[in-house]
Amino acid sequence: MRFPVAALYVRADGPYPSLVQDWWDEARDARLYEGPLPVVAHPPCARWGRYWFGGPSARVRRKLGDDAGCFKAALAAVRTYGGIIEHPEASHAWAWFGLCAPPRHGGWVSAGLTDPGWTCCVEQGHYGHPARKASWLYAVGVDLPTLPWGSSGQRLRLDYGYHSKEERRRAVRTGRCQRLSHRQRELTPEPFARLLVSMAASVRREVAA
């Protein structure tokens, strides 16, 4: 059974196509989504994360928040139809759009005094990701479950924070670094995707109207 939910900014080879009634991958422009289903959104995070400027080896310095309006559109969709946004922990998008940062140790907190949403920090390692992959969630109109808060234990790292390509190559060559592929880093574990979809499916009709 597919949930009456739309998944935005997701991978065609990920878990969402088999879980939801509508899904938007890179071949579709999720900024154009017009409802009526509640959403689970994974807007692009490259320009909002730790290396928003392109990283230490980047030839061109990027602009913070330059995601062609994807996060703004995802925020509007969640606030209009209900649902959830997932982004990496410490995403600059939270401060940019006036959302309160959630505590690292977990628990749902208000996204702001006048904001309709709730936010929390949870590690995808609890749901099978090979790395801890701490994520921030922003939810509107959904049932807020108690999640496995806190650390998911010692796991592979998403990024080791090396200052140059040579430093990274040396770590890989000597076995001090077990790097995840781009797909491994990006893919949402099926149990976590199912959790987010089930939360979005709990949106009341009056919220998604």
Image (spheres, rainbow, N blue to C red):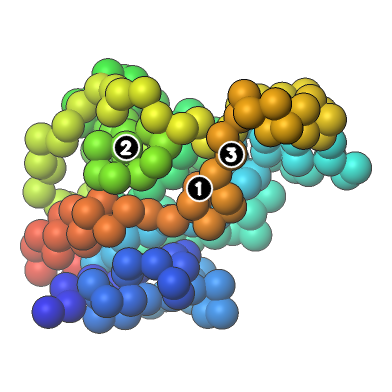
Q: Which element carries disc 3, helix, strand or loop? A: loop
At a point 38% along the width and 59% down the height, the residue shown is 41
Q: Which element carries disc 2, helix, strand or loop? A: helix
Q: Amino acid at mark 3?
A: Arg
Could you tell which of marks 3 and 1 lies nearer the N-terminus? 3
Tell whether 191 sits left or right of 177.
left
- The CA span between labels 3 and 2 is 16 Å
Residue 3 falls in image quadrant: bottom left
Tell whether 154 sits left or right of 196.
right
Whether residue 101 appears in this view of the structure is: yes
Instruction: Tell me the residue that label 2 is attached to.
Output: 125
Quadrant assignment for the N terminus? bottom left
Q: Amino acid at mark 2?
A: Gly
In this rendering, the label closer to the viewer, 3 or 1:
3
Instruction: Tell me the residue that label 1 is attached to.
Output: 185
Could you tell which of marks 1 and 2 lies nearer the N-terminus? 2
Along the line of sight, the residue nearer the viewer: 3 or 38: 3
